[in-house]
Image: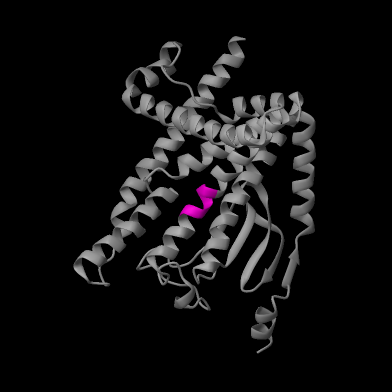
Amino acid sequence: MTAAIARANGSISNVRVSPMWAAITILSILALGLLAPSALWLLAFIGVIVLAHEGGHLIAARRAGMEPTEYFWGFGPEIVGFDVNGCRYGLKAIFLGGYVKLHGMTPTSVLPEGVDESGTYRAASHGGRLATILAGPFVNLAMAVVSFFFVALLQGYSLVESVASGFEWVWLVISLTGIALWDLVAQMSPYLGALFDSSEPPVRFMSPVSQATETGAAVSSGLVGSLRWFGILSAAIGIVNLLPLPPLDGAHALVAAWERVVQAVTRDRSRTVDVRRLEPLAYVTIGFLVLLSVTALVFDVRDLLAA
């Protein structure tokens, strides 16, 4: 009864703090700030972008009747956490993004004890699921538009011109990201060959090394440069997440839309997509992203050593 009353009132409960992990994290951040301040700025930028992305999922999920159970910045051991309305919020020790946890993402997943079926992802309407999935990338793209808007405004453009500039810059990032990914797939052989013959690859992507360098340069250049770089990162993360490849958001959105169409055509609400069949493609996607990250790091480190 007490738990139900606390949940209804939205009060904070079950507050836990880990002094050990808090100290370790603070010391790690201080060390990173001294040794690689650009990397620390990059973590801050990515942290805000990912938290906003997951916050979009969180808000849309609640509006769709789902009951998220966790919303954290970071991964690994918990530094500080508290419960509000059945959802745990807080910070974790590894500041490499964040997440929101929704149960019932597949039709056959087993729910933990205490989680009600009515509050799961699979119990929501197709429209609610679609809105929940698309909310994360939408927030990223919207933040990018706003960032580019202020860049133009600070550079002396009119209000109307600044709004147009915001959308134009986002479209430019989307276009260039799509072209780069297409070029990579189309020229995979020479791209991989460049790893071994020291030639310049046909297309380049930024590893965390070059991203940190660019972030440091953007911050040093002032507010305009920082906002522009933040917008580029936010738009790129938003559009990549919309790719229709599991486990990215685009695949979840496609499944929700496809199920709705199939059920409408067949008039059979029991028809669902068995997402377990998509697991092999999810592993391929993850492997591709890992390959992209590792090769980008190799190219960037090679350039640094050659400089």
Relative side of 177 to 50, left or right: left
Q: Residue at x 60, y 13 (%)?
A: 305
Q: Residue 302 at x, y = what percent?
A: 55, 16
Residues rendered magenta in the picture: 134-138
Between 210 and 197, the one nearer to me in the picture:
210
Quarter occupied by the C terminus: top right
Q: Residue at x 45, y 12 (%)?
A: 200
Write down the quadrant of residue 1 in the picture. bottom right
Write down the quadrant of residue 6 in the picture. bottom right
Q: Residue at x 57, y 61 (%)?
A: 58
Query: In this rendering, is residue 114 above or below 173?
Result: below
Q: Main secondary structure of the magenta part?
A: helix
Query: In this rendering, is residue 91 above or below 272?
Result: above
Between 23 and 121, the one nearer to me in the picture:
121
Q: Residue 56 at x, y = what percent?
A: 56, 55
Query: In this rendering, is residue 161 above or below 84?
Result: above
Query: In this rendering, is residue 194 above or below 85?
Result: above
Residue at the bottom extreme, as displayed:
1
